[in-house]
């Protein structure tokens, strides 16, 4: 015994219990790796909430923790969208905040006081561990081979396509939604396979959680009916399908309607109609099934045709009538932009202006999924080989996921799970095939048996197998090469994932990092500097006007009311801000007065060469404003006659007079020797005389000039207009000559 | 001991500054301090009303309106000065800063002396125009003082001026005897622009006109202004309620015109009203009359059974709300309840971007006291959530501005504030439907369970039979 420890080890791995233990340990390690690889940002920078939307979620979570659930549910937020306010409790997906709140209170109940910020920062990594386990479960439903499940868990854990939205600090809805998506799919497959009401109800429960967490729930709402529909078309209607679908739909829809933001949408909007339609269709099928068992075959044929035709006609008519009468809302803009990628650009600039709504570039697929993207079709092909109900699901999911991922960058996220599952099936099949050390026995008499033993595919493979039954690679070196190559690919995949995570997806974007000439890291912290200034130097209810991108950050970091923010629910209000930014001071000032604006914040990247600044976003402001006030704002006016977008001396008058331009370049000349002011972002030499401001005054400029804050002046104390008051302050004398000309205006009291 | 001293100091300060609402440090700018004897009665009146007078000449080195960023004086009175400008300490920018810092300015002009450029450009900023070349003389060939200016017709006699509009309080002629008359000797008239901050107090008679005695001695071809467009005493109140008064004739404040006898063109003699008028004009300028004070503002839920929190920061849509504002008006020595002129009302706006309500505030005697009047309005909030302002924006000529903005949020209905479904009669069919479905299902289950097929037993029975 002791002489052969290797054999002892090998035999130890064969027992079922040992395998379970090993699987458990491996899964735990994968979950650990998934969490660990998302911590780059915390280690490099600090435990900080990233980007834009997470700041709102963080603020909402703090409100929830401080005020309790019911106050959160009825939360009227008077510090955003001034002066309209926002019915925040009724217009958000509360799942994320409630999850963090529950964790917070649970930890406190266990006498582990953890700062709510740390819970929020680390929620996404924690859930990514769960996602890996959910991917394991889902894959296990596809193949009896649990190594595929473990591979899927590993891929899911470290695929950059998912990491992009779930690094520590990326406290967004997607952080928990992807776990819920995968887990709901797992439960659906489970319910479908067993025809179980219990699993169907569980599926509905997690579907409800998903609806509470992310607007992407519509993906499930459309994918499950589609799966059911495909199954029916394949002639695979069964009571299992009926039970699982009906249970899921009835309970899931009720659950989803409990979220105030969703409300009656599931019975009102077109996006939810497929689910309802399939639900009705299944009832009909069940009814027909019953009829078929009750009446003779020929009569049933006639009955079937009449019935099917009549129902379809009635259903279609009903849908058309209901849509034209306005009972069912027509498809939304985001939906249209899924089919026509230029739709949003023409009709809804506010949707098109978001970078994550742009179509995906090809390299992004490789960047986010690496080798999985070429293993993915293999896995789908392998699913076709077996094509049980659950494999149909993977095929359908793969088709739709790929299409949508091609249309919108951010839908790469919904594609990633199916890619991981399919790729895991492919890799595990490959490895299983080549890792088995057995060779078929040499005698040709037993070839057929050996062929079956080596793999069913070889037996089925057509002509060659009949003439030469034992086809395949049985040489150890050949197998070794295949396995070795695969192992190298897997290692390279891990390297790629780690590299992408560390370099591309771990920047908080609130803090910018740059390299000094000597290679040391230099942190550019202008955002927080400016927000801190606002927090410490302005009244608590000072209203800040900025472009909507910064609304959530101002609300979260500076704690000041804003006019518009990243929740773009009111296009007109955003267009108002766009108009104020793109018009001259005389036009902007009354708008700012009316909205009680105290400070205006602009982001300027000219000094540092920072590309995400407001001048680069300026055309979107103009476009959105033009959508509402086509007579007053014109995009054309911001282009030179030769069609160029310029900021230098040849910029158009509309550009030079716009508030945004003036605020960006005010006093900028003073940084440079006369006549040499350069905008390093746009490589433009600025005119020698900088813009002058009269209705607002500079209040703060951050260290690298990234953020500039201006204070809106009050009405002039002596009743003059701001231009002449500013001229008087500068010391220039009022021109009397103008007064003398023409008849005097008589004063009437 | 220390607290006693500070209490004493407080009392002292209160006693001294009780007379003007914004301090008693008055700077008098004269070309020559010796000139003050001409105005001794006027200045003595001011001193008797509690002002501490400091006299300076424009060129004085020690003159500074601001010390360490704070106003060094509360009020300034300018008497005619022969200097062309007023020196580096009284530039128009400094004077504008003084007004912006809530200081009050009284400027007097004289037709014999060219107005300093500094004051001319200050007047320009206030939209008040003086005759060209900074000199002018107002004459009237119909209402002049026959005893002192029988030839030159440049001492104009006017009745004390009444209110400029019917909804404006009468500050300057109230209580004047019908026989009393105002003398305006050798003054400069100004033309007022269209600014809404300006109010003419004393306008020239319709037969008066202004000309330049130096250039147009022979023939008057280019009139500067005539009739009521010529303002002899004008006031301007800035948005921060800083007051500015332009008196066209410094001479009318001199001792010789106080209580003098004048003869009108038709030969009647009368006593001048100048002394009382000077008191009222200076009193208005230096915040002794026409100053409004908001004592307190309160709003609360006006619903039966509601928690009666005072001035909450948030309401719900369609709440009934009551708003009350308490106002006092200062009258020379004490605060009195402010009552709006008969033709005028105080209004409350409830606005978000634009007013949703504009309501008259009615006097509320129950909450009024001896020195404060309360005005109140009760109304139902609009069916629109948002951040609203209770706004009282009361700007009237000669009264200091009242601009009060109280911000409240109006929230939507909370989830548990709607009527329950069984209260709504329209929901009864649906509630009934739910009940019927439940009952029907239970009935069906019962039926199903108790009508289990008896086949087996029947078969067994048959067999046994």
Image (tube, coloured by chain):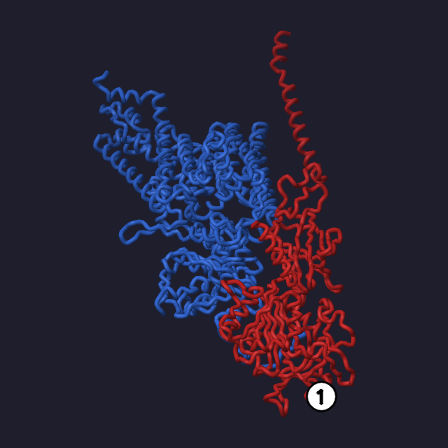
Q: Residue at x 56, y 33 (%)?
A: A251
Write down the quadrant of residue B143 in the picture. Answer: bottom right
* Residue B432 in view of the camera: yes
Residue situated in front as seen by the camera: A17 or A141: A17
* Horizontal side, residue B220 vs residue A638: left or right: right
* Horizontal side, residue A346 vs residue A439: left or right: right
Residue situated in front as seen by the camera: A571 or B162: B162
Q: Is residue A725 above or below residue A366?
A: below
Write down the quadrant of residue B250 in the picture. Answer: bottom right
Image quarter in which the C terminus of chain A is found: bottom right
Residue situated in front as seen by the camera: A146 or B443: A146
Q: Position of residue B335 (x, y in %)?
A: 69, 59
Q: Is residue A603 above or below residue A294?
A: below
Q: Residue furthest bottom?
A: B218
Residue situated in front as seen by the camera: A308 or A748: A748
Q: Position of residue A679 (x, y in %)?
A: 37, 63
Look at chain A in the picture and name its colour: blue
Q: Residue at x 64, y 51 (%)?
A: B384
Residue identified by numbered label 1:
B150
Q: Residue furthest front?
A: B1
Q: Position of residue A708 (x, y in %)?
A: 44, 58
Name the element at disc 1: loop
Look at chain B in the picture and name its colour: red
* Horizontal side, residue B136 vs residue A221: left or right: right
Marker count (numbered) = 1
């Amino acid at each position: 015994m002791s002489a052969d420890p290797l054999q002892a080890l090998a035999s130890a791995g064969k027992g079922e219990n040992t395998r379970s233990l090993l699987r458990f340990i491996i899964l735990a390690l994968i979950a650990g790796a998934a969490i660990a690889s998302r911590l780059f940002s915390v280690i490099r920078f600090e435990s900080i909430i990233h980007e834009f939307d997470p700041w709102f979620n963080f603020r909402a979570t703090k409100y929830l923790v401080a005020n309790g659930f019911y106050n959160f549910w009825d939360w009227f937020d008077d510090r955003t969208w001034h002066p309209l306010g926002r019915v925040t409790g009724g217009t958000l997906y509360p799942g994320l905040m409630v999850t963090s709140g529950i964790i917070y209170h649970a930890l406190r109940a266990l006498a582990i006081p953890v700062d709510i910020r740390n819970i929020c920062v680390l929620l996404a990594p924690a859930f990514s561990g769960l996602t890996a386990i959910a991917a394991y479960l889902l894959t296990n439903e596809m193949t009896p081979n649990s190594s595929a499940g473990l591979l899927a868990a590993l891929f899911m854990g470290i695929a950059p396509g998912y990491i992009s939205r779930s690094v520590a600090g990326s406290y967004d809805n997607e952080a928990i939604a992807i776990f819920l998506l995968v887990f709901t799919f797992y439960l659906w497959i489970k319910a479908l396979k067993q025809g179980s009401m219990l699993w169907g109800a569980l599926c509905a429960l997690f579907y409800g959680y998903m609806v509470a967490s992310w607007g992407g729930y519509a993906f499930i709402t459309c994918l499950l009916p589609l799966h059911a529909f495909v199954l029916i078309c394949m002639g695979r209607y069964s009571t299992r399908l009926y039970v699982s679908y009906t249970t899921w739909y009835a309970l899931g829809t009720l659950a989803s309607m409990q979220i105030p933001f969703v409300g009656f949408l599931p019975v009102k909007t077109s996006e939810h109609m497929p689910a309802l339609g399939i639900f009705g269709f299944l009832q009909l099928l069940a009814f027909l099934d019953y009829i078929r068992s009750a009446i003779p075959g020929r009569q049933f044929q006639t009955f079937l045709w009449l019935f099917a035709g009549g129902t379809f006609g009635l259903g279609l008519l009903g849908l058309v009538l209901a849509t034209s009468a306005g009972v069912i809302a027509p498809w939304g803009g985001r939906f249209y932009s899924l089919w026509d990628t230029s739709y949003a650009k023409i009709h809804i600039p506010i949707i098109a202006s978001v970078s994550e709504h742009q179509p995906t570039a090809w390299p992004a697929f490789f960047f986010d999924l690496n080798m999985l993207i070429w293993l993915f079709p293999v896995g789908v092909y392998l699913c076709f080989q077996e094509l049980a109900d659950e494999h149909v699901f993977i095929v359908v999911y793969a088709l739709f996921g790929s299409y949508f991922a091609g249309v919108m960058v951010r839908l790469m996220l919904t594609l990633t799970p199916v890619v991981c599952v399919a790729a895991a099936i492919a890799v595990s099949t490959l490895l299983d095939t080549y890792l088995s050390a057995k060779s078929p026995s040499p005698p040709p008499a037993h070839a057929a048996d050996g062929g079956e033993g080596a793999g069913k595919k070889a037996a089925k493979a057509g002509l060659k197998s009949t003439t030469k039954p034992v086809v395949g690679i049985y040489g150890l070196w050949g197998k070794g090469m295949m396995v070795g190559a695969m192992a190298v690919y897997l290692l390279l995949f891990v390297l790629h994932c780690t590299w992408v995570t560390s370099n591309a997806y771990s920047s908080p974007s609130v803090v910018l990092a740059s390299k000094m000439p000597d290679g040391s890291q230099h942190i550019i912290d202008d955002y927080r500097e400016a927000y801190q200034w606002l927090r410490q130097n302005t009244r608590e209810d000072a209203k800040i006007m900025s472009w909507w991108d910064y609304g959530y950050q101002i609300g979260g970091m500076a704690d000041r009311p804003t006019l518009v923010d990243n929740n773009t629910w009111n296009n007109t209000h955003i267009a108002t801000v766009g108009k104020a930014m793109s018009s001259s001071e005389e036009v902007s000032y009354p708008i700012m007065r009316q909205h009680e604006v105290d400070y205006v914040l602009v982001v300027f990247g000219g000094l540092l060469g920072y590309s995400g600044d407001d001048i680069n976003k300026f055309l979107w402001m103009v476009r959105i404003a033009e959508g509402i006030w086509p007579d007053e704002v014109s995009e054309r006016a911001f282009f030179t006659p030769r069609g160029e977008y310029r900021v230098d001396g040849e910029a158009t008058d509309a550009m030079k007079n716009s508030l945004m331009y003036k605020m960006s370049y005010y006093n900028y000349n003073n940084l440079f020797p006369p006549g040499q002011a350069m905008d390093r972002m746009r490589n433009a030499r600025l005119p020698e005389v900088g813009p002058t401001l009269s209705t607002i005054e500079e209040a703060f400029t951050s260290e690298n000039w990234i953020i500039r804050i201006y204070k809106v002046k009050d009405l002039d104390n002596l009743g003059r207009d701001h231009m002449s008051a500013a001229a008087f302050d500068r010391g220039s004398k009022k021109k009397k000559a103008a007064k003398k000309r023409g008849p005097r205006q008589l004063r009437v009291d | 001991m220390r607290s006693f001293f500070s209490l004493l100091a407080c009392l002292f300060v209160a006693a001294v500054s009780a007379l003007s609402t914004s301090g008693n440090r008055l700077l008098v700018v004269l070309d020559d301090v010796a000139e003050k004897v001409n105005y001794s009665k006027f200045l003595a009146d001011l001193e008797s009303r509690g002002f501490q007078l400091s006299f300076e000449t424009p060129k004085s080195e020690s003159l500074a309106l601001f010390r360490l960023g704070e106003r060094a004086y509360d009020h300034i009175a300018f008497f005619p000065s022969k200097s062309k400008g007023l020196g580096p300490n009284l530039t128009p920018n400094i004077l504008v800063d003084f007004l912006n810092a809530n200081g009050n300015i009284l400027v007097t002009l004289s037709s014999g002396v060219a107005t300093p450029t500094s004051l001319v450009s200050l007047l320009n900023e206030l939209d008040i125009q003086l005759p060209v070349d900074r000199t002018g003389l107002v004459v009237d060939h119909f209402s002049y003082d026959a005893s002192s200016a029988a030839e030159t017709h440049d001492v104009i006699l006017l009745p004390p001026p009444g209110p400029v509009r019917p909804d404006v309080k009468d500050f300057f002629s109230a209580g004047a005897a019908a026989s009393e008359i105002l003398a305006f000797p050798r003054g400069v008239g100004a033309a007022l622009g269209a600014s809404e901050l300006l109010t003419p107090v004393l306008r020239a008679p319709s037969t008066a006109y202004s000309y330049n005695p130096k250039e147009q001695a022979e023939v008057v071809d280019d009139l500067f202004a005539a009739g009521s467009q010529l303002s002899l005493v004008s006031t301007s109140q800035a948005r921060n309620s800083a007051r500015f008064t332009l008196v066209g004739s410094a001479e009318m404040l001199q001792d010789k015109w106080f209580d003098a006898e004048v003869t009108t063109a038709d030969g009647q003699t009368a006593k001048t009203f100048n002394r009382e008028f000077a008191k009222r004009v200076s009193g208005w300028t230096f915040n002794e009359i026409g100053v409004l004070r908001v004592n307190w503002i309160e709003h609360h839920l006006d619903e039966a059974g509601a928690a009666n929190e005072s001035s909450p920061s948030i309401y719900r849509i369609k709440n009934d709300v009551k708003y009350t504002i308490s106002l006092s008006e200062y009258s020379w020595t004490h605060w009195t309840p402010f009552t709006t002129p008969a033709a005028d009302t105080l209004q409350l706006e409830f606005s978000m971007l634009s007013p949703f309500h504009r309501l008259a505030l009615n006097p509320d005697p129950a909450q009024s006291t001896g020195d404060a009047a309360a005005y109140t309005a009760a109304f139902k909030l609009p069916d629109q959530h948002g951040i609203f302002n209770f706004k009282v924006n009361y700007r009237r000529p000669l009264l200091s501005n009242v601009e009060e903005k109280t911000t409240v949020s109006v929230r939507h209905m909370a989830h548990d504030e709607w009527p329950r479904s069984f209260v709504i009669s329209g929901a009864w069919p649906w509630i009934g439907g739910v009940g019927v479905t439940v009952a029907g299902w239970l009935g069906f289950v019962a039926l199903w369970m108790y009508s289990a097929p008896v086949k087996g037993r029947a078969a067994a029975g048959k067999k046994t039979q």
